[in-house]
Amino acid sequence: PARRHRRAGVLPAGAAATGALMTVRPSFVDVRQDDDLAQPLIAELAIEYASRYESTEEGMLKWLRGHPPDEFAPPGGGMLIGLVDGQPVTGGAFRRFGLVEGDETAELKRIWTDRRYRRRGYGRILLAELESRIAGLGYRRVYLTTGDRQPEAEALYTASGYSRLSEQRP
């Protein structure tokens, strides 16, 4: 699928979500991509991507699981699942992207909120938590891509201060 490339400027020391309309703030736990807690969100991502990009769930699962789990693990990466009442409701990952204009840069991946919990601010809270963790590891920039059939994701990133790159990154 076509990708739109975005980046943020210099990360703040700590990030806080604003304007969130939710009833319970999730608690975040560190997981690996192959952790049982991550599987519901990865499975739902596969379903969503398959329907939006005219693919199969199996093909999308294979693609999503194609990254080695260590890419989203310390010391340069991480994966978080947000829990409400012990249930995974949101999640996302990051990994080292490399140097961009002299700054250590992280790449956000797998940002997702369970469809039953959308429009409550969980995506914004997750993004702020990921950015806080990324900044805590010394990264100065964040890079991400979002598919051209994901207007909700694009709206979240734009509202959170991300901007489109004038040219694509590798």
Image (cartoon, grey):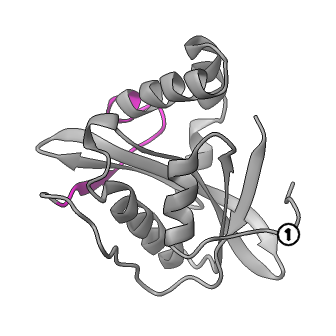
Q: What residue do we see at 53% from left, 25% from top?
A: 46
| Picture coordinates of residue 24, whole percent (x, y) | 13, 57
**Image quadrant in which the C terminus is located:** bottom right
Q: Is residue 90 left or right of residue 148?
A: left
The amino acid type found where label 1 is placed reads Ser
Image spot of residue 161 (x, y percent): 56, 76
Which one is in front, 80 or 53?
53
Classify residue 77 by image quadrant. Answer: bottom right
Horizontal and vertical percent for residue 144?
66, 58
Q: Is residue 86 magenta?
A: no
SS for callout 1: loop
**Part of the protein shown in magenta:** 25-39
* Residue at the image point whose x is 60% and y is 28% from the top: 52
From what the image shows, is residue 62 above or below residue 114? above
Residue 73 in sight in this render: no
Q: Which residue is mark 1?
A: 166
How busy is the neighbourhood of tag 1: few (under 14 within 10 Å), some, or many (20 plus)?
few
Look at the image and tell me in which quarter the N terminus lies. top right
Q: Does 97 sit left or right of 56 as displayed? A: right
